[in-house]
Image (tube, grey):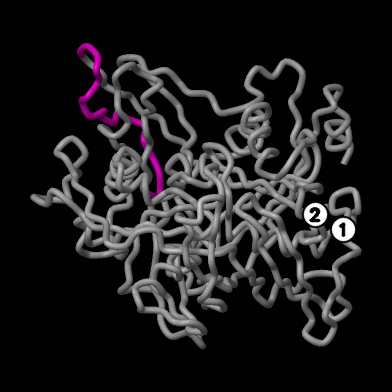
Amino acid sequence: MDVARQLEQTPSGEVIKCIDMHTTGEPTRIIYSGFPALNGTLLEQRDQAKSQYDHIRRRIMLEPRGHYDMYGAIIIPETELVQSGEAHIGTLFTHNGGFSTMCGHATIALGRFLVDTHDLTVFPQRNELKPDMTAREVKVNIHAPCGLVRVVVPTSADGQKSDSSRPVRFLSTPAYCAAKDLEVSIPPEVAWPELGEKTSIRLDVSYGGAFYALVDIRELGFHTGLHNFSLEAVTFAVKRLKRHLVTLPHVIEALQHPEDQRLSFLYSVMVVDHEIGSKPGGVDGAETGLCFFAEDQIDRSPTGSCVAARMALAHAKGTRKQGQAWAYNSLVSNHFNTGAFVANIVDEDVKIEGPNTQTARSGVVVLVEGNAYYTGTMSFIVEQGDLTPNAKIDVPVTAAQNIQLLSQTQYLRMVYTNILRGSNPFTRRLEWGKGVYSTGRNRCEIRSSWAPGFSSDDCFFHLL
């Protein structure tokens, strides 16, 4: 197509090429060309990407080229584990707020892509992959920031491309329970309406390549579970809870990884419902999770790295044993009755040690499987004169101003009149004016950066 060819020859030379895939509805934008070259170990490359090239991450992930819930994986051809022969390729994971250390749904997508590409400029070690012609599968070792992730990809009969009809599976890096049954006090300024008169909750912290706070949905006061519930209300509660958790010394203590401090942060709050879940054949049980990660992104998939963390937690509690298959669902997999991640523990005696042997942990290795599918391909440019190259634009709030927004999650066109009266801080609920129309429901946040002293937690919009 002539216009496409012309755009790819942009004078700036900054063409970023991507393949888009999804895993149970959760996107993975695979960046295979155009991201600046990075140096050092993989964690050092992650640090460099954060400090020097975060504007490019924003360009790829956020509006107008992406959206608030976009997820990405940057192909990194050279890492220390690639040089040692342990890995075939490296990757950096990206989201709306920065760079992650592990992602299961993206690993599943990457596995297929790396088998399907035969471009040695993209994947220099491609010819080192050795298909098992009998099993019709091939092993791909991916170096993620959290460590080596061993992936097995089903292939066609000739071993030259992936087979989308069968699940990709991967072995997690060592996963472990960091803290069980932590009591967390909830002061009045943090509490949410559904909590009622409760002043504390209990939750667990577990690691599966990133740290997760795991809490039962009913512990938060939502007694119908992850069925027939208000997503807006749960989002409100989890946002408050996550900000509170990272201030608590006993939670911070649980978030310390024995091997590297750069892994020691709370990535996500996973809200769990053990009572529901689509159950495929061959598993012993099923459950559902709603994962809030990074800057309040909601995972559409069952969250592969958290599946490893949840298996490690269940093993530590004595409710899961080696070889016991379990299905982990998201809201999407429950809705379509397909797309659950199936997992089982393959090694229950793993030691995780760092420089300080007193912080060593006992963990497990988890086998996780799921399916990913291609959705498209694109080349991103910045045209000369474009003043919004690297992110979406925040629209300032002014009194009685008509604002047009594109919804961050469903792209529904919304036109509303906000009523903001009085002085800052703005704590009143905004009211809808005429012209709001949609076939569904959604929530639009007014970000605190738009108006001094205004908290986005104080206001929700509902499309009727």
How many angstroms separate mark 2 from mark 1 (CA)?
9 Å
Residue 170 x/y as whole percent: 64, 69
Q: Amino acid at mark 1?
A: Gln
**In terms of depth relative to the viewer, which is nearer, 156 or 412?**
156
Horizontal side of 42 relative to 119 (left or right) equals left
Q: Quadrant of the C terminus?
A: top left
Q: Which residues are magenta?
A: 422-440
Horizontal side of 21 relative to 377 (left or right) equals left
Q: For the point 27% across and 64% down, which residue is it?
A: 225
Horizontal side of 87 relative to 355 (left or right) equals right
> Which residue carries the number 2 mark?
82
Q: Are marks 2 and 1 in contact (CB under 8 Å)?
A: yes
Q: Amino acid at mark 2?
A: Val
Confirm whether residue 463 shows in the render: no
Compared to 291, does 463 lie above or below?
above
- Most common SS among magenta residues: loop
